[in-house]
Amino acid sequence: MTQNYYGWGLPIDISTHGAGIDKLIWIVHIAMVLLFVGWLLFFVYTLIRFRERPNHKAEHHGKHFKLPTYVEILVAAFEVFLLLAFAMPLWNQAKNQMPPDDKALHIRVIAQQFAWNIHYPGKDGIFGKTSPNLMDSSNPVGLDSSDAAAKDDVVTINQLNIPVNTPVIVKLSSKDVIHSFTLPVMRVKQDVIPGQSIPVWFQATQTGDFEIACAQLCGLGHYRMRGFFNVQTQEDFNKWLQEQAPK
Amino acid sequence: MSDHSHKELPFWRKYIFSVDHKVIGIQYAVTGLLFLFFGFCLVMLIRWQLAYPGQELPFIGSWFPETQMIGGIMLPEFYYQLGAMHGTIMVFLGVVPLAVGGFGNYVVPLQIGAPDMAFPKLNMMSYWLYFIGGVLMLASFFVPGGSAQSGWTSYPPLSVIAAGGQTWWLIGMAFLINSSLLGSVNFIVTIIQLRAPGLSFNRLPFYVWAQFVTALLLLLAFPPLMAAAVLQLMDRLAGTSFFIPTGLVVNDAITHFVGGGNPILWQHLFWFLAHPEVYVLILPAMGIVAEIIACNTRKPLYGYKALVYSVCFVGFMSFVVWAHHMFLTNMGTTMSTFFQITTMIISIPSIVILTSLILSLWGGSIRFNTPMLFAIAFLPMFAIGGLTGLPLGLAAADIHLHDTYYVIGHFHYVVAPGTIFALFAGVYHWFPKATGRKMSEFLGKLHFFPSLVLMNCIFTPMLIMGLAGALRRMYDPTQYAHAQAVQPLNVFISISAFCLALAQIPFIINFFYSIFWGKKVDDNPWQATTLEWATPTPPPHGNFLKAPEVYRGPYEYSVPGQKKDFWPQDMKGAN
């Protein structure tokens, strides 16, 4: 990894859906700064103007202000705008607008302390059967070798490769504790909860070598539960998957 | 009180197992301050590791046993123990006991003109349950495997399969929960039943209102956590699986859990407490700030009624926002919409409270003494804390910001330069009532200004780190490429935190020096109007020499036509 993608601002965004999230974060912060600075100026002015000094007396019947009511209404209206224009559509997009099954690449990610097991269905496009009883260090996802669909399945550890410009659906599950599957550059973060299988989808717009992070405290090795996330061209991806296939 | 107000009590009944609300309040306050200091020490160890991961801790590194540090280099086990216990201690053993147990106990009965709390023995029991809970939490550092290390949130399954200290944590929490429940019942009954004649609800000092709503929150929010703690204890000790799904595979071995439980259930129960708990941390602080602002601007609060309605509304709403901590637990659109809307709604009364407090300054004659400095600094600091909650309350923005340093920066702005500043303000403000002496203004200012600057040097960079995606709870923050650019900020934050510790030295000196040698003051040194200043100083057991009667509202400052600029609540006739 030679290119440096990360600086002090938001990490670069290489997803098709992330622009909306970034825009929301920007708009909220601009509004917050404006509100706070305006407020702070009034605050400091008040402190100076009404400081205790000789011949200055406090007024028992203070002035009644109308402006704050308007500001409060404005803030409420702005919040409604944020909800309707950004928060709800974006959440709906993330949750309910999965790409069609036949158009997307399907991957399973099985988290464990402290690694990401990545399970590709292989050529036949069907995931082999798995069972918790078969899980051990040589078979991290518990693949059932007697199942025909399992023969061509590809399992990697901490290495998630996807093709660029292709929708990807990842089904997340966990063997042990709660993890959180995070692709910072893809604006993806989803808790991985044992006992559940949770889908997330994303689509990359450029190639590059990035990382998978775990965002939920999962034990002593939480800080080093780092995976590699490589976005490749379709040809490179096909070639890579070929190399990984069981011989 | 009648049976023991006339005879001299033995030392241990008077100062240790006391039933006097003032002694209990001071016990709570001092214990709370000690725990705040201890919690701060824990976080300084964390800050060393975050700034200089894997480097030997200078000077004191070799004092730690090999289960915590090897050759002065911190182990991940110890790092995660420090993290979990810093949160637990600051919230449950530091801030809440100081704000509610300390100030609440000391000030509320005085401000409502009562001789004591309604149930003095329950009050004593509340303190001692808290004390036992604290001892258990401290002792857990020394059990095999160390203390709790699954975060202050203790999410299962991690917490269920964690080392022994988690059991101690759960039992310790049970004591703390029951302590708070006894306290809250006591506050509610006291405020409803023991108000002085004439002190109607619309004449209550805002601080009493804040404590009243706080007590209701504690009473209603803690029982679900108590239930959850018992269930988790059963999962750990009795082989149940309330929070553990079937087929869990830990370290390549299948576990015995077969009950088909759900780890998300814990999160709902936990946050059903822990969100109202946020308001338990902030409402008493707002109450303290309101009292000090009214007194030191020499004018009534702006919009007393709006303040009271807002604080009640915030209290109610705080019960229906809890799942905004859980947006990323696979929440659908319906649920997330509901909790986003309630979260946006709760921001409005918070803005009303903040606005009223700022407008209270307008038209005043502002005295910039130490309590007032801390109280007015609370306003912009809490404003930053509140504003940064906005993006976190929007589920879509939470995708990027959840579990990053942005969250840490946000809630620390609310609690550290927010609530803790208000608590310092309260210490400086009511110290003369409890001791008869004022704290030094010079040392107070030497405490205030560096603390204000350093608090911001600590928490603003956290917001920047969070926007860059730096994740929380990382033993070694340099592991991830995306967090490397902002690593220099970690060094800056840590140095600021160490300096903040130095900035507390004037406070510690001031506190002890002033108890013995501070400037002696009369009963009402701030020329305030509320009832606590109508007692002798320090107030004797039973508080008031003559049961007070109340003739007017709490903030009658600078009333036109009066000789003095304050008109005490209990003064019959003109001033």
Image (cartoon, rainbow, N blue to C red):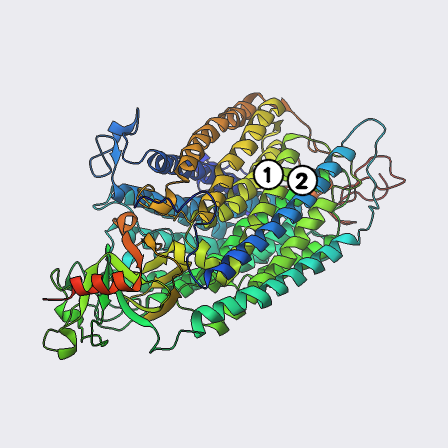
Q: Position of residue B372 (x, y in %)?
A: 66, 35
In depth, the one of A87 and A58 nearer the eye is A87
Q: Are marks 2 and 1 in contact (CB under 8 Å)?
A: yes
Camera-nearest residue between A201 and B285: A201
Q: Residue furthest front?
A: A235
**Residue at (72% x, 55% y) in the render:** A71
**Marker disc for residue B292:** 2
Query: In this orientation, which residue lies closer to the viewer: A246 or B475?
Result: A246
Three-letter code for the amino acid on which mark 1 is drawn: Gly
Viewer-nearest residue: B391 or B456: B391
Going by the numbered disc 2, the residue's amino acid type is Ile
Q: Quadrant of residue B350?
A: bottom right
SS of the residue under disc 2: helix
Q: Where does the image place residue A166, in percent across and percent down from the top left?
A: 36, 67
Q: Which mark is residue B442?
A: none
Q: Secondary structure at mark 1?
A: helix
Residue indicated by mark 1: B426
Identify the chain of the residue marked 1, using the numbered disc in the image. Answer: B
Can I make out residue A83 in this image?
yes
The quarter of the picture where the C terminus of chain B appears is: top right
Q: Residue at x 47, y 53 (%)?
A: B180
Q: Specify the subunit that label 2 lies on.
A: B
In the rendered image, the vertical position of residue B137 relative to residue B167, given as above or below: above
Name the residue rendered at 20%, 71% in the picture: A122
Name which quarter of the figure residue B200 lies in: bottom right
